[in-house]
Image (spheres, grey):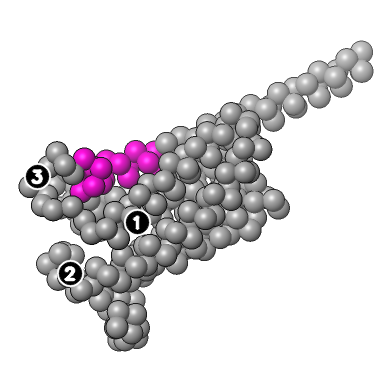
């Protein structure tokens, strides 16, 4: 009798763990789907469906187009990787991980070149009244945090899959402001930073809260990364107005 009860307990424990893994896979797959959807909507008029909106003017420079293709490829790979894990095709996921590293390097390099190159033809009016050198802190911070989150995810991929997955989510959330800043809904854009930075902040808090509730404990790496990302949004504009940053920005753009 005792043996049967032990066997039932073991089976129950196994099924609970399997159910927990299933819920986790669904959570990360949902996050991976939401990310490209928001990006596609945000850049729909400015890039993806720009030929259908003649009023938007001429297309971007070749460098911007290359950067857009690279970043789009990384976004699609991000979603694909989440799907591979949820479908238990971990070996293929690991093989494609190396392609993700290569794409990440290209994202950083092309993103940096686009950010620096934009200074030559931007005005404060193009950035909501923010001087170009001040605004430069925003894309540079995006790239720095991407390196931190994605680099951390790659470093921890074999040590802890839990931290790896959560840092990958943060690397995606970090890239949402450029998309929300271009959402084709004037009423939302009129909210300014409340909308542009509010969306990734709310999603970050929601993801952290759900993850903590589901696991009944807070993931310290996820918490630290979430705080870093959220604090970075107001910090960027404060840093951008300092003399130290302006001197550094001028040196970058020489």
Q: Residue at x 34, y 68 (%)?
A: 113
Circle 2: is it few (<14), some (14-19), or many (20+) Cα within 10 Å? few
Q: Position of residue 128 (x, y in %)?
A: 16, 64
Residue 6, by quadrant, is top right
Residue 49, by quadrant, is top left
Cα–Cα span, label 3 and label 2: 21 Å
Q: Residue at x 39, y 52 (%)?
A: 70
Q: Residue at x 33, y 84 (%)?
A: 251
Helix, strand or loop at label 3? It is helix
Q: Say which of marks 3 and 2 sits in front.
A: 3
- What label does residue 67 carry, if any? 1
Residue 148 or 214: which is nearer the viewer? 148
The residue lying furthest to the front in this view is 62
Quadrant housing the N terminus: top right
Task: Residue 138: say if magenta.
Answer: no
Q: Identify residue for label 3.
A: 54
Label pair 1/3, CB-CB below 8 angstroms? no
Q: Position of residue 170 (x, y in %)?
A: 48, 52
Circle 1: is it few (<14), some (14-19), or many (20+) Cα within 10 Å? many
Residue 139 or 98: which is nearer the viewer? 98
Q: Say which of marks 2 and 1 sits in front.
A: 1
Q: Position of residue 108 (x, y in %)?
A: 43, 62
Find the magenta span and give its range. Answer: 34-49
Q: Identify residue for label 2.
A: 122
Quadrant housing the C terminus: bottom left
Q: Residue at x 92, y 18 (%)?
A: 3
Helix, strand or loop at label 1? It is helix
Q: Is residue 76 visible?
A: yes
């Amino acid at each position: 009798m005792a043996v049967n009860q032990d066997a039932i307990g073991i089976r129950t424990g196994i099924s609970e763990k399997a159910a927990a893994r299933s819920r986790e896979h669904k959570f990360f797959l949902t996050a991976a789907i939401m990310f490209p959807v928001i990006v596609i909507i945000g850049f729909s008029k400015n890039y993806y469906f720009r030929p259908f909106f003649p009023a938007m003017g001429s297309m971007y420079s070749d460098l911007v187009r290359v950067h857009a293709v690279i970043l789009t490829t990384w976004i699609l790979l991000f979603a694909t990787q989440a799907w591979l894990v949820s479908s238990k095709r971990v070996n293929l996921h690991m093989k494609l991980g190396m392609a993700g590293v290569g794409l990440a390097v290209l994202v950083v390099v092309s993103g940096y070149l686009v950010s620096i190159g934009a200074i030559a033809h931007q005005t404060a009016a193009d950035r909501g009244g923010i001087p170009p050198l001040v605004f430069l802190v925003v894309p540079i911070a995006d790239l720095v945090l991407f390196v931190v989150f994605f680099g951390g995810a790659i470093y921890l991929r074999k040590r802890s899959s839990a931290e790896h997955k959560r840092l990958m989510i943060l690397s995606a959330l970090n890239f949402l402001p450029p998309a929300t800043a271009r959402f084709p809904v004037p009423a939302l854009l009129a909210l300014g930073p409340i909308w542009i930075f509010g969306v990734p902040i709310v999603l970050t808090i929601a993801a952290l809260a759900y993850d903590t509730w589901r696991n009944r404990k807070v993931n310290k790496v996820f918490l630290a990364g979430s705080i870093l990302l959220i604090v970075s949004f107001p910090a960027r504009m404060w840093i951008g107005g300092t003399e130290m940053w302006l001197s550094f920005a001028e040196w970058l753009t020489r």
